[in-house]
Image: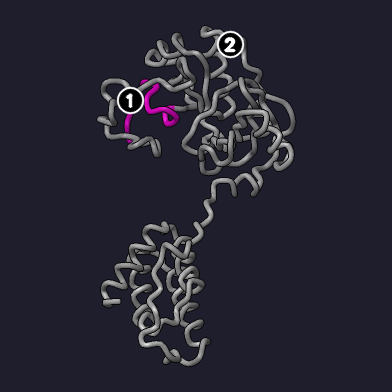
């Protein structure tokens, strides 16, 4: 989508003119849909209720449903003028309280700033771009699509792929490319493993570790981290088998420390495992070995 795709000024916010605004946006490759009172999409029709039509499961992506009505939330957004002007959409436009668009479908990301504190944070942190005033804050628009997420910071939502944003006018300023600092807002850092979440077996009988050289243990932990990191499938099973192998070699002598276990947990969490899953896998491995 070009820089000028959202520069069409919306007509006055009267229900009779929402259709004209939608058609103008669609002509600029911006997928649109009607909004009802409360700034929410129209609900599924009877045939599509609870996804009985078989399409768009959980609204994760447009599916095979061919329903001509404005169903399925953001997935109903379209640029097809025949659909937008169809008889099936006519009643929705008549009842509409506003117009929405699918930012991801237009190659855009909207940073929704819900209060003055969020706006102050954006001005201090994010590259300047086109801004659109909202009822309580501002929309900052960037060129480029990404994963959507709510509450990435206090008062900050990301609306792009599989989401919708209310059309409130073209805004002002030059639209910038989507920066990495915005993409990073949806990346969850691995949780920190607390000592209380894992059990380090005491050294059996005390005395010197039979492995003698700390480098042997460090090399084993590094290999275990690599094995988890390189897993392309069956991550749960890989994590469990790796924990089992580490405990088989080092669990009985007591040479494992919280630092070693944290390294293993962090590697697993980087692959998407939760702290709970890591703890369960660790406990199951200990039980299997009778530790």
- Is 269 on the left-hand or right-hand side of 204? right
Task: Judge the density around disc 1: few (<14), some (14-19), many (≥20) Cα neighbours within 10 Å.
Answer: some
Which is more N-terminal, label 2 or label 1?
Answer: 2
Quadrant position of the C terminus in the picture:
bottom left
Residue at the disc numbered 1? 67
- Is 117 on the left-hand or right-hand side of 81? right
Q: Which mark is residue 13?
A: 2
Q: Is residue 66 magenta?
A: yes
Which residue appears at 53% of the width and 55% of the height?
189
Image position of 244 with respect to 8: above or below:
below
Measured as percent of width and height from the top left, residue 267 is found at: 48, 66
Q: Please name the predominant secondary structure of the magenta segment in the image.
A: loop
Which residue appears at 68% of the width and 24% of the height?
171
Residue 68 sits in which quadrant?
top left
Provide the residue span drawn in magenta: 64-76
Residue 282 sits in which quadrant?
bottom left
Q: Is residue 10 magenta?
A: no
Measured as percent of width and height from the top left, residue 279 is found at: 37, 63
Measured as percent of width and height from the top left, residue 195 is found at: 46, 65
User: Which color scheme did the rendering employ for the protein?
Assistant: one colour
Q: Which mark is residue 171?
A: none
Q: CA distance from mark 1 to mark 2?
A: 28 Å
Secondary structure at numbered mark 2: loop
């Amino acid at each position: 989508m070009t820089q000028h795709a959202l520069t069409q000024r919306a007509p006055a916010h009267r229900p009779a003119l929402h259709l004209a605004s939608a058609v103008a946006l669609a002509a600029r490759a911006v997928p649109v849909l009607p909004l009802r009172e409360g700034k929410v999409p129209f609900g599924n029709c009877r045939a599509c209720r609870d996804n009985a039509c078989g399409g768009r499961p959980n609204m994760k992506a447009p599916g095979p449903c061919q329903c001509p009505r404005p169903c399925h939330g953001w997935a109903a957004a379209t640029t097809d003028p025949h659909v937008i002007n169809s008889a099936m959409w006519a009643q929705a436009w008549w009842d509409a309280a506003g117009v929405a668009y699918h930012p991801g479908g237009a190659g855009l990301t909207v940073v929704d700033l819900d209060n003055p504190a969020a706006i102050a944070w954006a001005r201090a942190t994010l590259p300047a771009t086109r801004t659109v005033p909202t009822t309580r804050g501002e929309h900052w628009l960037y060129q480029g699509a990404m994963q959507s997420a709510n509450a990435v910071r206090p008062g900050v939502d990301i609306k792009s792929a599989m989401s919708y944003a209310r059309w409130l006018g073209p805004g002002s300023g030059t639209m910038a490319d989507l920066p990495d600092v915005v993409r990073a807002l949806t990346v969850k850092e691995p949780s920190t493993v607390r000592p209380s979440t894992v059990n380090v077996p005491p050294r059996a009988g005390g005395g010197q570790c039979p492995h003698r050289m700390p480098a042997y243990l460090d090399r084993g932990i590094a290999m275990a981290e690599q094995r988890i990191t390189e897993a392309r499938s069956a991550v749960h099973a890989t994590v469990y088998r790796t924990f089992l192998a580490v405990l088989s070699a080092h669990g009985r002598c007591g040479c494992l420390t919280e630092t070693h276990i944290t390294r293993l947990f962090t590697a697993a969490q980087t692959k998407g495992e939760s702290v709970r899953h890591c703890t369960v896998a660790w406990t199951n491995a200990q039980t299997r070995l009778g530790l």
